[in-house]
């Protein structure tokens, strides 16, 4: 079957998703897929593409079907043990890169696929970088991703700060922050609940981090937290007790997304 025929047959699905599936199955670049619609798809590739389309029709995220997602210009492997890194989380990396200086001790708490830590490692020299998560399966994905990206950092299994030692100059985290009954959860059913949900109002992990982080930060050390678009005021209120210079930063969609502060 020709590429053009297959694309026409599946025209109800997003064209970009279909083209990326073709790239993966036929080992072609997107430019080749666009320029050579006359190419033939062999039987083995066609069978694989049929399975891929079935998964897309079941609303499975393209990143899990392809097994990868790009974050901060780095290709990361993903599987259902990890949250698919979101573009808005790149803000956390942008903010971190503005404050990191050589010699700093930095922690990415709840690292998942390792996205944030690996992006930082790829853009910073001479820092001591730790990345932690409660999920061993997620840490295995993160270790693989760090290896693939050619960066070195230390991965630690820990329930938030419970198994961590010493003080950091910067702690950053994109923790789970979705409320248990959030109406968007059914659409996210392929991703791990541990990575998404945190109590009845989505604030459990954020609250625990804000209350415990002062014991793991140096004086004037920075805490950076990603949160839901409607959680900034609650995060700021919780931070006021132990932090100063508290600021909330909008993402590219103009939603309040990351709140930062310095330990008093
Ligand atoms: C929203 S995901 C973020 C993953 C990654 N940082 C990113 O931005 O793509 C949250 C992560 O928190 C981890 N997690 C959930 N509860 C945790 C806990 N109590 N301690 C440590 N990690 C936890 C999950 O396993 C998941 O990997």
Image: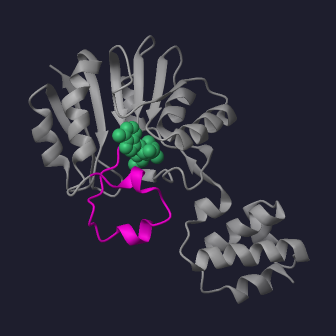
Q: Quadrant of the C terminus?
A: top left
Residue 93, above or below 22: above
Q: Quadrant of residue 168?
A: top left
Q: From this viewpoint, which residue is outermost toward the top?
A: 103
Q: Main secondary structure of the magenta part?
A: loop
Q: In which quarter of the image is residue 239?
A: top left
- Residue occupying the point 21% across, 22% down: 214
222 inside magenta stretch: no
- The reply, left or right, for residue 76 in relation to residue 236 is right
Residue closest to the eye, 241 or 253: 241
194 inside magenta stretch: yes
- Residue occupying the point 65% across, 56% down: 67
Residue 53 appears in the picture as rendered: yes
Residue 178, above or below 105: below
Q: Quadrant of residue 166?
A: top left
- Residue occupying the point 74% across, 78% down: 50
- The reply, left or right, for residue 30 in relation to residue 82 is right
Q: Give the range drawn in magenta.
A: 175-198
- Residue 111: give x, y in percent of width and height: 46, 38
What is the count of numbered marks? Answer: 0
- Residue occupying the point 60% across, 60% down: 64
- Residue 246: give x, y in percent of width and height: 17, 33
- Residue 232: give x, y in percent of width and height: 19, 48
Residue 89 appears in the picture as rendered: no
- The reply, left or right, for residue 31 in relation to residue 59 is right
Residue 203, above or below 66: above
Q: In which quarter of the image is the N terminus?
A: bottom right
């Amino acid at each position: 079957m020709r590429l053009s025929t297959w694309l026409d047959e599946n025209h109800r699905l997003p064209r970009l998703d279909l083209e990326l599936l073709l790239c993966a199955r036929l080992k072609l670049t997107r430019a080749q897929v666009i320029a050579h619609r006359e190419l033939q798809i062999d039987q083995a590739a066609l069978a694989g593409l049929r399975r891929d389309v079935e998964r897309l029709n079941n609303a499975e995220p393209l990143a899990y079907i392809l097994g990868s997602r790009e974050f901060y210009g780095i290709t990361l492997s993903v599987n259902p043990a990890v949250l698919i890194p979101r573009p808005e989380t790149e803000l956390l990396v942008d903010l971190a890169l503005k404050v990191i200086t050589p010699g700093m001790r930095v922690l990415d708490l709840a690292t998942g696929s390792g996205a944030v830590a690996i992006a930082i490692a790829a853009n910073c020299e001479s820092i001591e970088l730790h990345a932690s998560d409660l999920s061993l399966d997620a840490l295995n994905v993160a270790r693989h991703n760090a290896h693939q990206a050619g960066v070195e950092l230390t991965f630690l299994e820990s329930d938030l700060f419970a198994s961590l030692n010493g003080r950091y100059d910067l702690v950053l985290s994109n923790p789970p922050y979705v409320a248990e009954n959030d109406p968007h959860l059914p659409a996210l059913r392929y991703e791990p609940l541990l990575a998404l949900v945190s109590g009845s109002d989505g604030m459990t992990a954020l609250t625990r981090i804000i209350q415990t982080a002062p014991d793991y930060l140096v004086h004037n050390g920075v805490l950076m937290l990603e949160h839901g678009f409607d959680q900034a005021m609650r995060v700021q209120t919780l931070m006021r007790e132990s932090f100063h210079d508290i600021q909330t930063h909008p993402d590219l969609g103009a939603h309040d997304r990351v709140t930062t502060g310095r330990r008093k």
